Image (cartoon, rainbow, N blue to C red):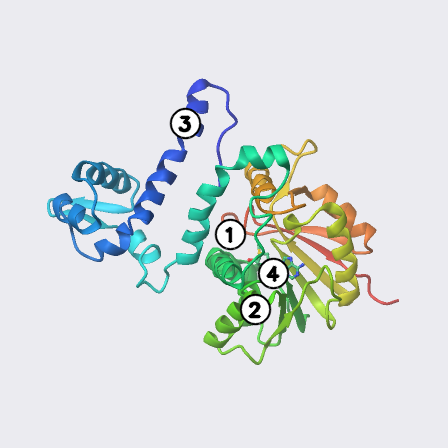
Amino acid sequence: MTHSPTIQSFKQFRDVVYSFRLSRIIFTALDLDLFNQMGNRAWTIAQLSKRVQTSQRGLEILCRSLASAGLMGKTTAGFRVSRFAKTYLQKNSKEFRGDYLTLMHRQWEEWSRLTEVVTSGIPVDHEEPETPEYRRSFTWAMHHRSLEPAKQVAQQISLKSARSFLDLGGGPGTYALAFLQKNPHLQASVMDRPAALEVAGILAKELSMESRLSLHSGNFIENKIPEKYDIVWYSNVLHIYSPSENRKIFKKIKQALNPGGRLLIQDTFLQDPQGLRPLETNLFAVTMLLYTETGNTYSLQDVRAWLHKAGLNRTRIRRMKQGTGDWDGQILEARKPSAS
Ligand SMILES: C[S@@+](CC[C@H](N)C(=O)[O-])C[C@H]1O[C@@H](n2cnc3c(N)ncnc32)[C@H](O)[C@@H]1O
């Protein structure tokens, strides 16, 4: 997450503007497939430049920056990838975050079109129909992004009294699977698009959870949410839709909850009445402007009001331990009233 200070001096301004440099350096390393090409050994610049077909001067300057940033080490034998890069940036690692790297890399180009998108109000991929390949890759990226926070959240939210759980727009089902692992009495479902559910199916199989995780293929804007649940988990979906769309979704969720059931919303929320804090939440609204027709980020206060209007009350904020969970570690909870 971005914790930039508010800009009050020209130096701060300059530092913020130039923070693109390291991102660009990393994307060039990815373009050159540098981390994979380097494997596990040390390379002199002369050797490595032959291998990746670059100028020696260009590569030496690039590698020095990558080493300064901790993605490589430098010894008398030459440059080698750091432990971090070996773990997350090399294809042969179990922890390789390949689809997440692809997503970030693509965003470099797409963010360059921001002026055009602000001017037109139309997202970048507006004319391209979504392909299953794109959805699969995006879903793997979501899994890479959620692996650690999902485990942390499942540890801290008690689902002792719940038996059924829906991960709505759950993508890879990383959260559903983490809650299933923590709660042996729980059955879960993921509702999402078919290509996303393919990924959820693979992950469920890897964890031998197929019998406890059902996959519901469908569009929850157009279709009814199937079955009834004690918990609906709505993570990183709120920001894809407009206030009125979210209000309609909350009504559907209410229908899908058992009496006394809970909706848990994980997202990035604006915290102040003017909608200026935190910066990260506003930067993420720009991501939604680039990629969605109606998405945005919202204040806790507004979302609570929509929940109450939909008949979901007793709202409260569940705070995760500092540094754990997604975003700032705030989860908004609301209840469907128990039958009287
Ligand atoms: C940003 S991802 C979040 C995935 C997961 N919930 C998480 O927190 O990591 C949003 C997910 O919502 C799904 N989604 C959005 N709108 C949907 C709709 N109308 N019907 C079904 N799935 C939808 C997308 O396909 C995607 O998998």
Q: Residue at x 59, y 49 (%)?
A: 127
Amino acid carrying label 4: it is: Ile
Mark 1 — residue? 324
Few, some or many residues within 10 Å of mark 4 (<14, 14–19, 20+):
some
Q: Earlier in the sequence, mark 4 or mark 1?
A: 4
Mark 3 element type:
helix
Report the residue that reaches farthest toward the right: 340
Amino acid carrying label 1: it is: Thr
Amino acid carrying label 3: it is: Asp
Closest to the camera, between mark 4 and mark 3, is 3
The quadrant in which residue 109 appears is top left
Q: Earlier in the sequence, mark 3 or mark 1?
A: 3
Closest to the camera, between mark 2 and mark 1, is 2
Closest to the camera, between mark 4 and mark 2, is 2
Mark 3 — residue? 15
Place of residue 195 in the rendered image (x, y in percent of width and height, measured from the top left): 55, 66
Mark 4 element type:
loop
Place of residue 246 in the rendered image (x, y in percent of width and height, measured from the top left): 73, 51
